[in-house]
Amino acid sequence: MSPMTNVRDTTFDQDVEYMHLIKAYILGVFLDDFKFQDATSDAMLAKAQTVMNDGFRYCPGVDPINLVYKNTSRGSLLRQMVLDMYVEEAMPDRMDDADEHYTYDSDFMAELALGLMGKRGSLAIDDEEAEDEDENMSDEDGDELEDEEQETTDPCRYHEHVRTGMPCYRTVFKKYL
Ligand SMILES: [Zn+2]
């Protein structure tokens, strides 16, 4: 088995797990159980942040992305979460299969383009500030961006309970977590 095959197999397994989690989230929508939805989206976030045994982290691929967009509407927090994964962290090789370019949900592709354009705008502002300080310290640009992202990280940013004004499941079920 070639190394490339190993990587592909790992990627496939990641998408299968994402598909299960997304289906669970959609079930939570049908059941009108926002605590279940929030716990499921947290599981997806934890999965995306986990380094696998091949040394890589994996965001959802084309099938999980399309499942999200097919079963949610504009303004969905689940949509926002998977979109942020692509805008903020996904590497180009996540989408480098030419056949897949044309199979991603069109709304996702449009929102991804807008998200990247918005990020490019903020990078340009940061670049100007960095040039004022030191033209040869481009590496520090990235560090500053990461620091800013960590400062703005809210553990409930993709949680539905915020919209309802109800407490977080992490609080309600604290003694079980
Ligand atoms: Zn919460």
Image (cartoon, rainbow, N blue to C red):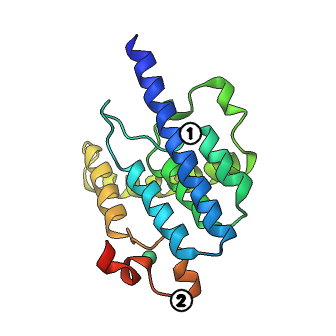
Taking depth in this image into account, of 51 and 135 the one nearest to the observer is: 51
Whether residue 27 is situated above or below residue 95 in the rendered picture: below
Instruction: Name the residue at the top extreme.
Output: 1
The amino acid on which the numbered mark 2 sits, given as a three-letter code, is Gly
Where residue 54 appears, as percent x and y from the top left, is 32, 30
* Mark 2–mark 1 CB contact (< 8 Å): no
In percent of width and height, residue 65 lies at 62, 46
User: Horizontal placement of 47 versus 143: left or right?
Assistant: right
Judging from the image, what secondary structure is the residue with disc 2 in?
loop
Q: Which residue is mark 2?
A: 165
Helix, strand or loop at mark 1: loop
User: Which image quarter is the N terminus in?
Assistant: top left
Q: Quadrant of ligand 1?
A: bottom left
Quarter the C terminus occupies:
bottom left
Amino acid at circle 1 = Gly
Looking at the image, residue 104 lies above or below residue 97: below
Residue 105 is drawn in which quadrant? top right
First in sequence, mark 2 or 1: give its number: 1
Query: Label 1, on which residue?
Result: 61
Residue drawn at point x = 29 percent, y = 57 percent? 144
Residue at the image point whose x is 39% and y is 71% from the top: 155
Would you say 57 lies left or right of 71 here? left
Marks counted in the figure total 2
